[in-house]
Amino acid sequence: MKSIVVTERGKFNVMELPKPVPGVGEVLVKIKYAALCYRDLLQLRGYYPRMKYPVVLGHEAVGIVEESNDARFKPGDRVVPILHSVDGACDMCLRGEEAYCRSRLSFGEEIDGFFTEYARVTGNSLVKVPDWVSDELAVLTPCVLAMIHKGLRRIGLSIGETVLVTGAGGGVGVHAIQLAKAMGARVIAVTSHEEKAEVLGRFADSVIVGSRFSEEVKRSISDGVDVVIETVGTPTIGESLRSLRIGGRMLLVGNVNPDESYQLRLGYVILKDITIVSNIAANRSDVVSVFNMARLSRLEPIVAAKYPLQDFGRALNTLQSGSRIGKILLAP
Ligand SMILES: [Zn+2]
Ligand SMILES: [Zn+2]
């Protein structure tokens, strides 16, 4: 089966691998779609110290169960994996905090991922996809919508609050807008791409174009916003902090320039009573919550492009160019 394999830091190959055999408690999943994520790019470049080589890249997927050694799943079930392979038995898993599993292994990093035709996944890491959720929405739920859901849950978003989303035209941003809206917020989208403003206006209550957005935020809301979802990182975090009201909260989920650092002025953060919550991965319960929300609210999966699996290199170029709105999908 065709697979995208990272062979060493910065290098990948399209390789033929044998179809995996599921072990005890594992499920064999035929991948329908996998999605590209900025994390893939950083894993490929070697920013993750626990990366093992060779490894099949990819951690976002939707597929169909072909074989199951877990009584909870049967052939034909449509499933999505969370970001990690988890044991389902440690104290964190028993609390429902699989993202913090004591023995978690990251797909596409420490254990083979989903840029392939078939994957073996522990049943502890899978969630069944209900009928009302499309493949395109399902594939981007765990790492995008459910991840944001967990963050906004931890930050205690209340109905009627104002949320500012930076990097709003990115794969995370455009879906973060929709999720915050579905959770009852008023949303301001910030993008540096003028050409993306019109589409973003379909989802957000208002759109600001440009890098000096805090002044414009303060013109319409003099106190500042209640919450910022920061999907960019170092280039925008200063303006994001300035956009928050006193007692505001920041959800930090993106860091597109990991080589650059940002000097946090502690006095500024303390005097403004700002809460910063970072967030990386969702629990299975967040995936279920988003699927349930999709039944009541419109959550539209925005797909920038679809490529066949072997065109991974082209897909990666599209991701890096940042010129398109939404997520990039790979189809084996
Ligand atoms: Zn991801
Ligand atoms: Zn665990």
Image: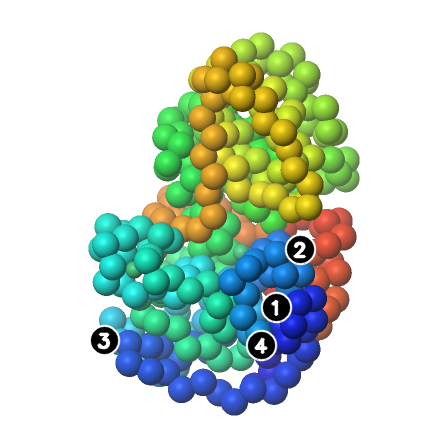
Few, some or many residues within 10 Å of mark 2 (<14, 14–19, 20+) = some
Single out the mark in the foreground, 2 or 3.
Answer: 3
Point out residue 72 in the picture as x, y percentages from the top left corner: 25, 71
* Residue beneath the point at 31% across and 51% down: 97
Distance from disc 1 to disc 2, alpha carbons, whole Å, reads 11 Å
Q: Is residue 221 visible?
A: yes
Point out residue 86 in the picture as x, y percentages from the top left corner: 34, 64
Q: Earlier in the sequence, mark 1 or mark 3?
A: 3
Disc 4 marks a residue whose amino acid type is: Pro
The residue carrying mark 2 is: 304
Q: Earlier in the sequence, mark 2 or mark 3?
A: 3
**In the picture, which quadrant includes the N terminus?**
bottom right
Disc 2 marks a residue whose amino acid type is: Ala
The residue carrying mark 1 is: 330
238 over 288 or under it: above or below: above
Few, some or many residues within 10 Å of mark 3 (<14, 14–19, 20+) = few
Distance from disc 4 to disc 2, alpha carbons, whole Å, reads 29 Å
Distance from disc 4 to disc 1, alpha carbons, whole Å, reads 20 Å
Mark 4 CB lies closer than 8 A to ligand 1: no
For ligand 2, give the image quadrant. bottom left
Distance from disc 1 to disc 3, alpha carbons, whole Å, reads 29 Å
Distance from disc 2 to disc 3, alpha carbons, whole Å, reads 37 Å
**In the picture, which quadrant includes the C terminus?**
bottom right
Describe the element under mark 4 as helix, strand or loop: loop
Few, some or many residues within 10 Å of mark 1 (<14, 14–19, 20+) = many
Describe the element under mark 3 as helix, strand or loop: loop
Single out the mark in the foreground, 3 or 4.
Answer: 4
The answer to whether mark 2 and mark 3 are in CB contact below 8 A is: no
